[in-house]
Image (cartoon, coloured by chain):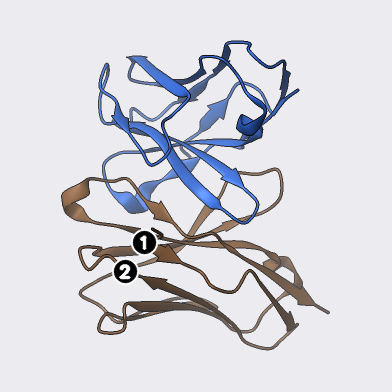
Amino acid sequence: DQQVKQNSPSLSVQEGRISILNCDYTNSMFDYFLWYKKYPAEGPTFLISISSIKDKNEDGRFTVFLNKSAKHLSLHIVPSQPGDSAVYFCAASAREAGTALIFGKGTTLSVSS
Amino acid sequence: DVKVTQSSRYLVKRTGEKVFLECVQDMDHENMFWYRQDPGLGLRLIYFSYDVKMKEKGDIPEGYSVSREKKERFSLILESASTNQTSMYLCASTPGTPGGYTFGSGTRLTVV
């Protein structure tokens, strides 16, 4: 059973607009959440994270929101740029489980100019 | 910068062969991981290791084994390669915090 779900396989956005990528989780023990970005033929790179004690974390154009009661998090990219086109993975971990991350299936973002 | 190096970018192996995928990190990280990435399935954890000679099964360990004889090196072994193990394999390491993952560039393995 999937513990981290990204229900939208793909998202298309115009340059300059907002991209919103969503992620749901089922395990209430998860206490740390991350977003990774992946280009073809490269390994994923860390983008932004949020601890369960927060509901928002911001880094430049990227903001992650966490709604613990809904077990939902989202990544906002504003403004979107063509270079943001990539696969975005949501990941989660539980302190008691160590540092192993559980990843979602990914969402492919395409930003058109 | 932490570097995680996977020895091969592309590999083609025959069914039944024993396959070794090597991963080396240069920052003295305790924790190392092997994932595979498949379209529509995301990244799935195969095995991980928190210390030398220690290993833990991930979500999909069947058909794989691992070896960690030295802290910097974590090897993934396909005992008898099968076509359903055709995939992108990704190695990662972290010093002990989940946010500190650094991934290698991946090995695209094709089993024919």
What label does residue B90 carry, if any?
A: none
> Considering only order in the chain, which callout, 1 or 2, is on the residue closer to the N terminus?
1
Describe residue A3's horizontal placement relative to residue B112 as left or right.
Answer: left
Q: Amino acid at mark 2?
A: Thr
What is the x, y in percent for residue A31? Answer: 23, 64
Residue for badge 2:
A26
10 Å crowding of disc 2: few (<14), some (14-19), many (20+): some
User: In the image, is residue A100 above or below residue A59?
Assistant: above
Q: Residue furthest bottom?
A: A17
Q: Chain of mark 2?
A: A
| Residue A48, visible in the rendered structure | yes
Q: Quadrant of residue B104?
A: top right
Q: Secondary structure at mark 2?
A: loop
Q: Position of residue B60 (x, y in %)?
A: 43, 38
Colour that chain A carries in the picture: brown
Q: Check contact, mark 2 vs mark 1: CB within 8 A.
A: yes
Residue shown at 65% from the left, 44% from the top? A42
Q: Position of residue A14 (x, y in %)?
A: 76, 84
Residue A88 in picture, x, y percent from top left: 57, 63
Chain letter for mark 1, please: A
Q: Which hue is chain B drawn in?
A: blue
The residue furthest right is: A113
Residue hosting label 1: A3
Residue shown at 63% from the left, 12% from the top: B16
Residue under the image location 68 percent in, 17 percent down: B15
Residue at the extreme left: A96
Q: Amino acid at mark 1?
A: Gln
A100 or A26: which is nearer to us? A26
Q: Nearer the viewer, residue B36 or A18?
A: B36
